[in-house]
Image: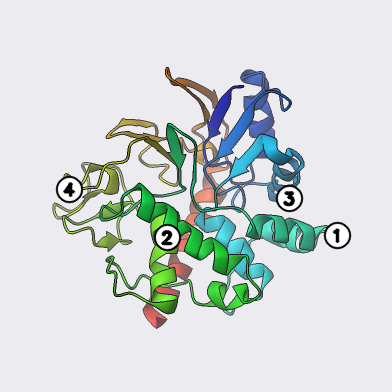
Amino acid sequence: MAIYAIGDVQGCYDELIRLLDTIAFNEHNDQLWFVGDLVNRGPKSLQTLRFIKSLGSSAVAVLGNHDMHLLAAACSVPSTNTKVALKEVLAATDRDELIDWLRHRPLFHHDEHFCMVHAGIPPQWDFNQTKKMAEMVQKALQGNDYRSLLKGMYGNKPDIWSPMLRGKPRLRFIINCFTRMRYCDKYGRLDFNFNGTPGSQPENLMPWFALPNRKKFGMKIVFGHWSSLGYHEGDNCYAIDTGCLWGGQLTALRLGEQVERFSIDCSGRRGVAIFAKACFEDILSKQAAKT
C-alpha cells in the first residue's frame, strides 16, 4: 500500500483530481493523508468534501483552520464570516452529514514513521503530549457540547503553553497550535501577526519547526498551512502547502523510507484569493481583539 500526503486543497477539486491521476491513486490499495484546509477559498468546497468523504478509510484528513471555520459557521457562531464556497456547503441537502463527518476528523494523525498536523506543534510538547492534547480537543469537538468549543475557539490568547491552562483557554491554545501557528519566539510564544517567508520575519521570531529547543519526535512531521513557506524538507519536517489556490502547485508526498514528491501546476484564483485572505485575516484580528 502506498501512502500519499496531500497539501492544502482549499476547495480546488479539479486540481485534486488531476493530482490523483498523476500519482495513479488506487483507492483500493493506497491511502491519502490530507493536511487539512479541505475547504473555503477555492471554487468547489462542496465537491471536495463529498469526494474525500466518499473515499472512506482510503483517506485520512486532519482539521485545518478553514475546516474549523466551516464547523463554526454551521453552528451560526456570531461574527463568523461565511464565504460563497462555504455557503454552498451549508445549503447542501447532505449538509448535516458532511458537517458531522468533518467534526469527527482528527487534529493529529500518525503511523509508525510519520505524523501529520495542519499547522504546527509547540516546542514544549513531545509525541505523547501532542497526541494527548489532540485527543482532548477531538473529544470535545465530537461531544454533545461541541458548539461551546467552537464559540470559544477564536482569539490569539493564551499564546504560550502552560500546564496550568484549563478549560476554554487550554482548548483554544491547542486549536491554535494545530491549525494556525507559523512563528514563535525562542520561548515558544506563538505569533499571529507575521506570516511571510522565513528570513523576512522580525528578528525575535523563528519558524516553529526551527526552534533549537523543540522537543524531538521519533518520526517525521508532515504539515501544510504555510503557502508562503512553500515546500520545505528539513528539521525532521515536510511542509507541503505549495499554494495551489495562489497559482502555485498542489503537492503529494509518497511517504516511505524514500520520500517522493509529486506536484502539479495550478492556475489558481490569485486575485480573488488575495482579497479573501485579507478579509479572513481582518476578521480573525477583530475577533482576537475582543477576546
User: What is the crowding at mark 3: few (fewer than 14 residues within 10 Å), some, or many (at least 20)?
Assistant: many
Label 4 or label 2, whichever comes before in sequence order: 2
Q: Is residue 13 left or right of residue 217?
A: right
Q: Which residue is mark 3?
A: 46
Q: What amino acid is labelled 3 in the image? A: Leu
Q: Which residue is mark 1?
A: 93
User: What is the crowding at mark 2: few (fewer than 14 residues within 10 Å), some, or many (at least 20)?
Assistant: many
Q: CA distance from mark 4 to mark 3?
A: 41 Å
Query: Which is nearer the eye, 175 or 283?
Result: 175
Residue 236 position by quadrant: top left
Q: Which residue is mark 4?
A: 213
Query: Which is nearer the eye, 188 or 73?
Result: 188
Residue 25 position by quadrant: top right
Label 3 or label 1, whichever comes before in sequence order: 3
Q: Residue sitting at 48 percent across and 64 percent down?
A: 136
Residue 80 location (% of width, % of height): 58, 72
Label 3 or label 2, whichever comes before in sequence order: 3
Kindly identify which numbered label has been placed on residue 133. Answer: 2
Q: Residue sitting at 37 percent across and 78 percent down?
A: 289
Label 3 with label 2: CB-CB less than 8 Å? no
Residue 260 location (% of width, % of height): 46, 19
Secondary structure category for the residue under label 3: helix
Q: What amino acid is labelled 4 in the image? A: Asn
